[in-house]
Image: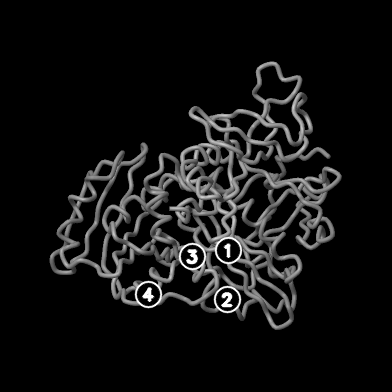
Amino acid sequence: MAFDFWKKKKENTWSPVKASPLGYWEEKSYMMAVPEVLPREILTQVKDRLGMIPGAILTGFNFDAETRKMTFTMFYEDEEYQGGIDIGDAPKLPSTPQTLQMFTQDELARLQNATHGLIVYMKFGKKPYDAYHLQLKILTTLVPDLIMIFDESAERNVNGRWAKMAAASKYTPGPKDLFQVQAVQGKDGKVWLHSHGLCRFNLAELEVLNTDVEHYQAHYNVLATLAGMMLDEGTTEKEGGFYIGMLADRIPVVATAVPWTEALAEYPGISMGGLEDRKDGHNSKTNVIFLYKSEEDQKNDVRSKLSIYDKLWEENPLFFFSNAETKRLSMVARERFDSAKKAFAKGCPVLIKIGLPVDNCEDGSEREHIWFELKSLEERGFIATLTQEPYNVSGIHTGDDRFLTVDDITDWVVMSEELRRQISPDLAYLLE
């Protein structure tokens, strides 16, 4: 099915209320570094520490002695950033299963003692990944002993060990690190998905309305994939929508998102995410996701709800990554492979994804990414066993061993019985 990505947009014709102005946490990125004890002398060290960040140039700094607030201007990756620094009360850590899993018992105990944190807020520009990476570098440089980062803009807690690992990396964090998706369930089993953290990148937040317990994970994948493409392309709106994936029978998934003030007209009597739920939030720059199910619908801007494909979401749909994200994932996997090697030496099974050159590709640029199981570490690489039959690679079959090098790796997973979970490169800090 061919799609025309140059349709003419229609003007909004319905608006029950006017969208509210952005909050301060939406206009700028607000994060707080939380140590067990914030040193009293921290403010006297800020200027010197800002000058220590690799690749960044501090071009302006001001300290207001009366308010004890600081502002700075910094040049990083060909872009200028303006921000500020302040001290605030440490947030109370929610006792959700997700939070408890993110921190060790020792870290949780130390966070209970925390009273204050250092706030860094910044105005982001045109490079979302670099901007977020820089803010992590600033926070971890100013507060080396941080246990947690409270990302107020994304309403998200970040483990301090992850933050330090990500800040020290040569590669930026990925799309899903830049925002969070919350799922709110109503009494009738309906679920409202909505993001936090995208507005600071001059994008609209994203929502899925009227999903349910059975399908919200699939709908989350739609939201997260669309958010990643928006971050890559720097826009919420795109002519003809975003081609984000493919369902069974090669049915394309083309998504668009419209302001909530327009979208609610298509959800009369909704139990979650209606006007009553937007009195105190989710009422500024936030868009609801719809799909175009055919070329004709796309041309005429006929939108469908995500539920039209609820029977197909279960059949392993393919969601797309940008070439830049695919390359970033490979580079991060190689950079952190030492963590996987240490885990393997301790007896943990390790799976490694390798990009094998496909048949009939003369320059070797096309690759099939397939999983191997690590068998032994060698001086210049490792030996691994193929775990699945390739589709387009001849000469190797399930169960065959092959000598490989770090340069062949595109991803890896450690099966940790001790941690009772699978560890990917993004969670490599858990293995240290």
Q: Earlier in the sequence, mark 4 or mark 2?
A: 4
Residue at horizontal 21 percent and vertical 51 percent from the top? 49
Q: Counting other residues with Cα less than 10 Å from the Cα at mark 1, is it few (<14), some (14-19), or many (20 or more)?
A: many
Identify the residue position indicated by label 4 in the image: 109
Q: CA distance from mark 3 to mark 1?
A: 16 Å
- Element marked by disc 1: strand
Of 404 and 233, nearer the camera is 404
- The label number, if any, that marks residue 278 in the structure image: 2
Q: Residues within 10 Å of mark 3 (few under 14, many from 20)?
A: some
Whichever of callouts 1 and 4 sits on the residue coming sooner in the sequence is: 4
Q: Earlier in the sequence, mark 3 or mark 4?
A: 3
Distance of mark 2 from mark 1, alpha carbons?
Answer: 17 Å
- Tell me which amino acid carries mark 2: Arg
Mark sitting earlier along the chain (3/2): 3
Q: Residue at x 41, y 43 (%)?
A: 169
> As rendered, which of 116 and 378 lies closer to the eye?
378
CA distance for labels 3 and 4? 13 Å
Identify whether 357 is placed above or below 84. above
Amino acid type at circle 4 is: Ala
Disc 3 secondary structure class: helix
